[in-house]
Image (tube, rainbow, N blue to C red):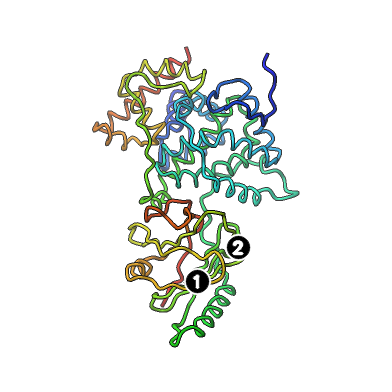
């Protein structure tokens, strides 16, 4: 059995390998400490997860400055809602990622994004949607998702990925893929249904 | 909402997590989720299923000022002796508070002070009137007050007690045009004391057409792109002139 590292053990990067069990355990402890109003715990949680959350938010918001501003809201929200995490059994990174994604999506569709319209757009590498997706950063539990994702049609994969990773709406996806809105909606609906079926097997 | 069909709930939860459930439907679903445990459970299941899609992205290190701001904000939300916020249902993530109420006395003081300084320096002192009070969210004192002459040719910025400087950063003032065009830089804000400047014609036109001004945090020397790049820390109403 691996020794239990203290929450602030900084020897290895949890980001590079988000799936080690101790990572879940330590993040859960840090969230509990936030619920008990320990600001140092929030700082540690920030050091360990903010780079990953920011990457996801920049993908959605395209502008780093806007994403960094929204990231502040995310950590204030984590601080306020830490007590609610106990009640769920899920993995802490999925919870943190959800708070970050929902905030980014809300900001993307608000007037606030307008203020940054002229700000520099972050240059990001294209996502690989066709064929070999790179899942190495996603950890062990993503193996099942990766396998099920490969069973979808290319259109379903593209639609789901554009929505989840880039924050694209149905209309955005229709524009990018030059397909009718109804077609796009059906890709996504069917893709999600297939994913669910596959992941529950 | 009366939907009891598990398939429908699950489909809505999936599109909510994905981000394709939007507008009013999204807000409605959010309320439903917070009230009904069986809905919340389906949302969580989808969050777990799909999170791997975003965990693949290469991490990006946030700028140092992000944590500074978070620290300031949580210091305000953790009142001593109050019931821990965690035991209450979490409020929705708040948008920035609208511009703080004008600290009228400070503006008046600033205008008087400014007027006096200008009177000493200039043969024909233009009359300086309050233009805006720039206060960061939650601060009790403004970071700056702005005054300008009636023609909006001269602008004076006065550093207030609410200002804390971050090393290596400049603070840039922007006019936010009402017609939706891009913010126009009105220059960098002083970090101490008082500073007067004359606006160019294009800055003046932009300011006339703007009912809001904003401050962004920029690299030293100001925005490298000519548009706000740093976080916008203050958005304030411009005082309307008759």
Picture layout, residue B88 above or below residue B139: above
Give the residue pinned by disc 2.
B162
Picture layout, residue A132 above or below residue B157: above
- Circle 1: element type: strand
Crowdedness near tag 1: few (<14), some (14–19) or many (≥20) residues, C-alpha within 10 Å: some
Q: Which numbered dot is residue B195?
A: 1
Q: Position of residue B85 (x, y in %)?
A: 67, 43
Crowdedness near tag 2: few (<14), some (14–19) or many (≥20) residues, C-alpha within 10 Å: some
Label 1 to label 2, Cα distance in Å? 17 Å
Choose top left, top right, bottom left or bottom right for residue A191: top left
Q: Are marks 1 and 2 in contact (CB under 8 Å)?
A: no
Please tell me which residue is depicted at 45% across the width and 33% down the height of the picture: B16
Q: Earlier in the sequence, mark 1 or mark 2?
A: 2
Q: Which numbered dot is residue A169?
A: none
Q: Nearer the viewer, residue B220 or B48?
A: B220
Q: Position of residue B15 (x, y in %)?
A: 42, 31
Q: Position of residue B88 (x, y in %)?
A: 65, 41
Direction from residue A139 to residue A111 in the image, left or right: left
What chain letter is assigned to the residue under label 2? B
What chain letter is assigned to the residue under label 1? B
Choose top left, top right, bottom left or bottom right for residue A185: top left
Q: Nearer the viewer, residue A97 or B232?
A: B232
Number of labels in the image equals 2
């Amino acid at each position: 059995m691996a020794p239990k590292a203290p929450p602030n053990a900084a020897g290895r990067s949890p980001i590079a390998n988000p799936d080690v069990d101790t990572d879940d355990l330590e993040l859960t402890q840090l969230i509990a400490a936030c619920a008990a109003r320990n600001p140092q715990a929030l700082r540690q949680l920030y050091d360990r997860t903010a780079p990953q959350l920011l990457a996801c938010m920049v993908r959605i918001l395209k502008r780093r400055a806007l994403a960094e501003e929204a990231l502040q809201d995310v950590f204030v929200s984590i601080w306020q809602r830490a007590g609610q995490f106990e009640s769920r059994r899920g993995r802490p990174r999925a919870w943190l990622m959800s708070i970050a994604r929902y905030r980014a999506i809300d900001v993307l569709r608000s007037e606030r994004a307008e203020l940054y319209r002229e700000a520099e757009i972050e240059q990001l590498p294209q996502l690989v949607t066709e064929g070999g997706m790179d899942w190495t950063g996603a950890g062990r539990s993503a193996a099942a998702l990766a396998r099920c994702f490969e069973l979808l049609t290319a259109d379903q994969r593209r639609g789901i990925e554009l929505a989840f990773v880039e924050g694209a709406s149905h209309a955005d996806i229709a524009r990018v893929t030059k397909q009718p809105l109804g077609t796009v909606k059906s890709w996504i609906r069917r893709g999600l249904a297939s994913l669910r079926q596959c992941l529950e097997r | 909402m009366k939907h009891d069909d598990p398939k429908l709930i699950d489909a809505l939860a999936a599109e909510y997590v994905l981000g394709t459930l939007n507008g009013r439907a999204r807000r409605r679903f959010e309320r439903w989720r917070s009230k009904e445990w069986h809905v919340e459970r389906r949302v969580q299941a989808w969050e777990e299923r799909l999170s791997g899609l975003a965990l693949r992205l290469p991490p990006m290190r946030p700028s140092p000022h992000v944590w500074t701001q978070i620290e300031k904000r949580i210091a305000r939300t953790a009142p001593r002796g109050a019931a821990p916020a965690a035991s209450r249902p979490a409020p929705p993530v708040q948008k920035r508070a609208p511009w703080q109420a004008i600290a009228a006395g400070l503006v008046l003081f600033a205008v008087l002070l400014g007027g006096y300084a200008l009177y000493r320096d200039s043969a024909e002192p233009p009359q300086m009137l309050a233009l805006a009070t720039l206060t960061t969210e939650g601060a009790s004192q403004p970071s700056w007050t702005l005054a300008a002459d009636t023609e909006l040719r001269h602008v004076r910025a006065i550093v207030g007690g609410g200002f804390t400087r971050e090393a290596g950063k400049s603070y840039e003032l922007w006019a936010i045009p009402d017609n939706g065009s891009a913010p126009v830089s009105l220059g960098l804000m002083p970090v101490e004391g008082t500073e007067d400047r004359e606006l160019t014609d294009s800055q003046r036109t932009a300011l006339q057409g703007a009912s809001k001004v904003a401050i962004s945090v920029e690299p030293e020397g100001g925005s490298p792109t000519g548009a706000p790049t740093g976080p916008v820390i203050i958005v304030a109403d411009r005082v309307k002139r008759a």
